[in-house]
């Protein structure tokens, strides 16, 4: 017997649950299909446990400033690794329970189906022995960390974030391969836990940075905490006495374990997307419209990490809402996407806003404002006066285009810039906002003033920088 529903949603992560919210509001019948863990990657092995892990490391690391502040006794402080990891898992479990408690835990069994779906046709699915016929389908199956096949033979000496937070302790030495968001955050945290870390990335930038000035500052700052090798791919072979030999170019190190963070692949296994009858890209994902999330002209929509476009929780949430709305309405609508906002919670934070420098470099109509964090009073008091702010604008109008920041509290400064870009504001309009003293926002103000001096167009009604006429 075939089960019939208006909308079938495959995947119960951030995108799937947000799609579900839109479908349930519409009154359409639905079925939520999930083959793996219920709940989100963010809560289980992503955003939330990693931030708990980072917070413990940062609090312990703070002791290195005590002597400068006249606080004595830091040499007696120690980290109980097992207790710290238990704390991380306790918080992780709270976050997972909250997700489940506000979603699938309160849903009747008849709308939940445990199992892995495969497409028979665009509107017909098979899950185990059951077939489902749906008017519309949302694919939101998420992604999985990549581990190159030859490295899997090293067993549990090679791990990803799927295993990291289950560890009760860590070895004396580790290599972190891949210094994007995840590798950089956890590599620095592990170093602050006391693990001897070597960070390796075949790219020349850290945390997604493309601005060469920001790249240089980030490298010089973080390389002081643990050695970072850039520009060469890593290889892993057997070392001495059960260790692993990690080599990149002409550099090598023997370590006890390796954390691999070289990216994530979409969860496609068994979906049989070829039965949709549309072309698939190199990653095996069907082409889709980024503003409607529709695949070709099919009644099928795609959202979240599996698209590979914007693998960030708030983007997955937005994509789930778009896909869910369009799957539960007759007319497919295009939605405006928000400016890019990507944050690496290392210390200092690395934050990317709007259009990256890699897409602006070489354009004659783009100007750059810069502020180094060294002389910023509030940052100096905090012992965090390392980094740089780089802000980009259109030369003729002063309209903000993007920014790359390497600084303490860039998670907050980045939001201010993203909100301004969402509103289409110019550097003049942003400078007319109040800036308190002493705060880190003054560093942003200084970068904006530098930017303002390079823009052609004067602001309407402005005679004094940052002040508008009545």
Image: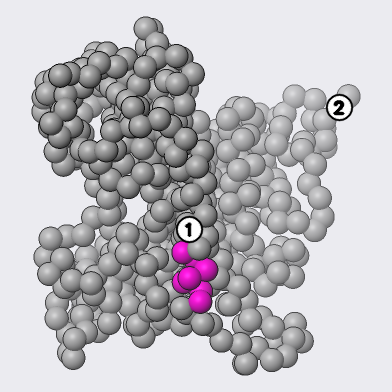
Mark 2 or mark 1: whose residue is earlier in sequence: 1
Q: Which mark is residue 92?
A: 1
Q: Is residue 469 visible?
A: yes
Q: Residues within 10 Å of mark 1 (few under 14, many from 20)?
A: many
Q: Which residue is drawn at 62% across and 76% down?
A: 62
Instruction: Please state which of the two labelled residues, at mark 2 or mark 1, is closer to the viewer.
Output: 1
Q: In this view, does 446 lie to the left or right of 186?
A: right
Above or below: residue 60 compared with residue 397: below
Q: Is residue 209 visible?
A: no
Q: Residues within 10 Å of mark 2 (few under 14, many from 20)?
A: few
Please state which of residues 231 and 277 is positioned toward the viewer in this rendering: 277
Q: Residue 469 carries which label?
A: 2
| Main SS class of the magenta portion in the image | helix
Tell me the element at label 1. helix
Position of residue 465 measured from the top left corner of the image (x, y, whole percent) = 78, 39
Distance from Cα at disc 2 to Cα at disc 1: 52 Å
Please state which of residues 301 and 380 is positioned toward the viewer in this rendering: 301
Q: Which residue is drawn at 57% across and 77% down?
A: 61
């Amino acid at each position: 017997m075939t089960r019939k529903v208006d909308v079938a949603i495959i995947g119960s992560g951030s995108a799937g649950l947000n799609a579900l919210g839109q479908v349930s509001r519409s009154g359409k019948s639905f079925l939520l299909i999930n083959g793996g863990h219920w709940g989100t990657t963010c809560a289980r092995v992503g955003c939330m446990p990693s931030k708990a892990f980072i917070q413990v490391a940062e609090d312990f690391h703070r002791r290195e400033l005590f002597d400068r502040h006249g606080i004595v006794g830091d040499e007696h402080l120690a980290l109980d690794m097992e207790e710290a990891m238990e704390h991380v898992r306790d918080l992780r479990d709270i976050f997972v329970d909250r997700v489940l408690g506000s979603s699938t835990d309160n849903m009747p069994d008849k709308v939940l189906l445990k199992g892995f779906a495969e497409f028979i046709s665009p509107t017909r699915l098979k899950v185990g022995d059951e077939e489902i016929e749906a008017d519309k389908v949302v694919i939101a199956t998420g992604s999985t960390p990549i581990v190159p096949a030859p490295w899997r033979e090293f067993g549990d000496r090679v791990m990803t974030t799927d295993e990291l937070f289950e560890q009760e302790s860590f070895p004396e030495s580790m290599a972190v391969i891949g210094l994007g968001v995840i590798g950089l955050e956890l590599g620095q945290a592990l170093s602050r836990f006391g693990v001897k870390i070597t960070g390796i990335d075949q790219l020349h930038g850290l945390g997604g940075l493309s601005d060469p000035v920001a790249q240089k500052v980030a490298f010089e700052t973080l390389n002081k905490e643990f050695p970072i090798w850039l520009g060469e791919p890593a290889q892993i072979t057997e070392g001495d006495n059960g260790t692993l030999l990690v080599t990149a170019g002409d550099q090598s190190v023997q370590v006890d374990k390796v954390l691999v963070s070289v990216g994530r692949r979409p969860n496609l296994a068994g979906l049989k997307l070829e039965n949709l009858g549309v072309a698939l890209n190199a990653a095996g994902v069907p082409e889709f419209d980024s503003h409607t999330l529709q695949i070709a002209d099919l009644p099928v929509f795609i959202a979240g990490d599996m698209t590979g476009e914007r693998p960030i929780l708030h983007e997955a949430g937005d994509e789930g809402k778009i896909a869910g709305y369009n799957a539960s309405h007759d007319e497919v609508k295009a939605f405006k996407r928000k400016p890019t906002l990507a944050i690496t919670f290392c210390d200092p934070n690395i934050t990317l806003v709007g259009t990256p420098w890699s897409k602006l470099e070489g354009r004659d109509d783009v100007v750059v404002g810069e502020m180094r964090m060294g002389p910023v009073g509030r940052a100096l008091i905090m012992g965090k006066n390392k980094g740089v702010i780089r802000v980009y604008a259109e030369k003729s109008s002063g309209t903000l285009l993007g920014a790359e920041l390497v600084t303490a509290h860039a998670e907050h400064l980045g939001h201010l810039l993203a909100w301004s870009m969402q509103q289409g504001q110019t550097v003049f309009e942003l400078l007319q906002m109040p800036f308190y003293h002493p705060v880190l926002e003054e560093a942003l103000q200084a970068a904006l003033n530098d930017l303002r001096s390079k823009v052609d167009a004067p602001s309407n009604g402005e005679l004094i920088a940052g002040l508008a006429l009545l």
